[in-house]
Every structure is written in structure tokens, then in C-alpha cells.
Image (spheres, rainbow, N blue to C red):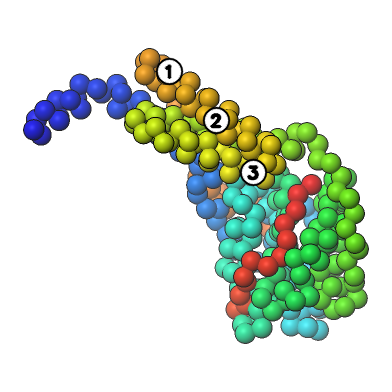
Amino acid sequence: MYRRQAVAFASQPARAGKIALLIVLALAVSSGFALALDVPPLTGRIVDTAHLLPPELAASLSQELAAHEQRTGNQVAILTLPTLQGEPVEDFSHRVATTWKLGQKGTDNGVLLLVAPQDRRIRIEVGYGLEGVLTDAVTSRIIRNEMVPHFRAGNYAEGIATGARAIIGTIEGTYTAPKDQPPAPRALTQQWSGFLPAVVVGAFVGAIFLALKKGFGLFAGGILAFLLALSSGIVIAVIAAVVSLVLALVLSVLFRGGGGLPGGGYVGRGWSGGGMGDFSGGGSFTGGGGDFGGGGASGRW
């Protein structure tokens, strides 16, 4: 019996090779979704790896954050990074805040302001102890009304400084977030930014399962494409799911017909050797052992 199985497997080397190639390609394309981005080291109250803040402003803002901590005991930190490399901003922000342990142990009064310009994503992560004052609604209004207008104008430094000062002012009672304004419509390219990656990943996943004669994989690929594109809107997510289903069928037909697919490389993710810098504003700074439960808000521009 084992000999017959070995002979049957050996008689299909090309098919096995193509399946392996499809798997490698899918991993290469979806690596941005599957692997966790490294948390950068906490080198100061401001870790500006995306180089969005001029040194003078970073130093001044770091002093304001230090003065706020001295007055209240709250720890507010800012992190900028060029891109999240496909990781959801909520997941990465929470991971950074808990790794850095912002806030004091027992009071959990830490806040993280995260900006990823290439992804056009903002996140204010709020520790347990400050969720009563920095509510989801308040942090959302700070992002939309104080930060996003500056970012859309290309003034990242002013947007970050305004957002950080609004956070401090809200905690200290000297700032009131303005009421919501009707959101400006996003550009068409921004609306469809998540469409292509979702379609490619969904199509490859569906094609792999079809190649392995697992019919349900076709729908798994479509569902995956839908979920990946959902942040761009329900209509775009549905279109992405349908397109990925069609492409998966096409890929499976090409595979069965002997068509080959080009290989792809993979670049690992992390912070070492990337030429990224940071500015801490001088002096040592460490988290105090605070904890986070997912409070806060996210935004895009």
C-alpha cells in the first residue's frame, strides 16, 4: 500500500511543485498581513521613526509631556512609524502600549498617540484609568477635528503637536473637544487603497485550496478578501470578495492546464538595519507598569 502511494505521489512531481509554488507566492504576498510588526524600543516620550517632527518641536513637545506627567502622574507618549506593514492599527497600538507599559501600575494612566503616514492611520490608545475622561467619542473628535485637517494639508508636525496638546488639555480639564463636523469625503484612491491587497491574498488562498481539491477554500478566499477590504467600505469589500473568487477560479484553471506562476521574494519585518531614527527629547523615560484594555479611537485621512 505504501509503495503504491509513493508511486502515485512520484508520478505527479509537477503538480506537487506547483502547489508548493502557490503556497510560497501566497506567503510572499500576504506576509504583510500574517507577521507581527516589531515593537520599537521606548527611547523617550517621543519615538519619531517616521521623522515627522522637527528637532525643536520634538524637544518642546517632549518637555510639555514631561511637565504633564510631573503635574498629574499620567504618561503620554508619541510614536510615529512610516507604515504598519499591513497590521491593524488597533492591534499594533495596543501591543506597543502594553509593551512600553505606559502609565503607573495600579492607576493605568497611560496614553499612546500613534501615527503611520504611509497608511494614513492615527490611533489614540488610552489606558484603563483614563478611559473615563479620554472616552472613545472624545479621542475620535480629537483625531477628526484637530489632527486630520493638518495631516490632509501635509502638516504632520502641527497635527501631532495639536493632537498631543488636546490630549493633555482634555485630561487636565483645559480643553473641550469640538463637536463632530461632517467628515470630508475621502479621495477615490484612498477609498480603494485596501482593494488590491485583499483581492490578491483572497485569490491566492482560494486557488491554493482549489489546487488541493478543497472546494470550500474558494469561499474562504472570498471571505478573507472581504474582511481585508472591509475598512474601505462594505461595497468595496463585497466587490473585492467577488473579484477574488473569479481570480481564484482562473488561477486554478491555469494550474490544472500546466500554467506556471512567477516566484516572489520576501523581505522580513523589523526595526534593525532600516535606517530609521528616533528622537526622545533628551533624558531617560520608561513606562511605569500601566495596562491597557483597548480604549481610545482610530482614524484615517
Residue 134 percent location from the top left of the image = 77, 71
Label 3 and label 1: CA atoms lie apart by 29 Å
User: In the rendered image, which quarter is residue 258 located in?
Assistant: top left
**Mark in front: 3 vs 1:** 3
Q: Earlier in the sequence, mark 3 or mark 1?
A: 3
Q: Is residue 299 above or below residue 230?
A: below
Amino acid type for the residue under numbered disc 3:
Leu
**Mark in front: 2 vs 1:** 2
Left/right of residue 159 with respect to residue 100 in the rendered view: right
Q: 7 or 266, which is in the foreground?
A: 7
Answer whether residue 133 is visible to the viewer in this image.
yes
Residue 188 percent location from the top left of the image = 78, 33
Amino acid type for the residue under numbered disc 2:
Ser
Q: Earlier in the sequence, mark 3 or mark 2?
A: 3
Q: In this view, does 114 lie above or below 75?
A: above
The residue sitting at 79% across, 60% down in the picture is 140
The residue sitting at 58% across, 44% down in the picture is 227
Count numbered badges in the picture: 3
> Contact (CB < 8 A) between labels 2 and 1?
no
Residue 228 percent location from the top left of the image = 59, 42
Residue 284 badge: none
Answer whether residue 160 is visible to the viewer in this image.
no
Residue 230 badge: 3
Amino acid type for the residue under numbered disc 1:
Leu
Instruction: Say which element carries label 3.
Output: helix
Label 3 and label 2: CA atoms lie apart by 14 Å
User: In the rendered image, which quarter is residue 24 located in?
Assistant: top left
Residue to which mark 1 is pinned: 254
The residue sitting at 85% across, 78% down in the picture is 172
Instruction: Say which element carries label 2.
Output: helix
Residue 66 percent location from the top left of the image = 78, 76
Residue 244 badge: 2
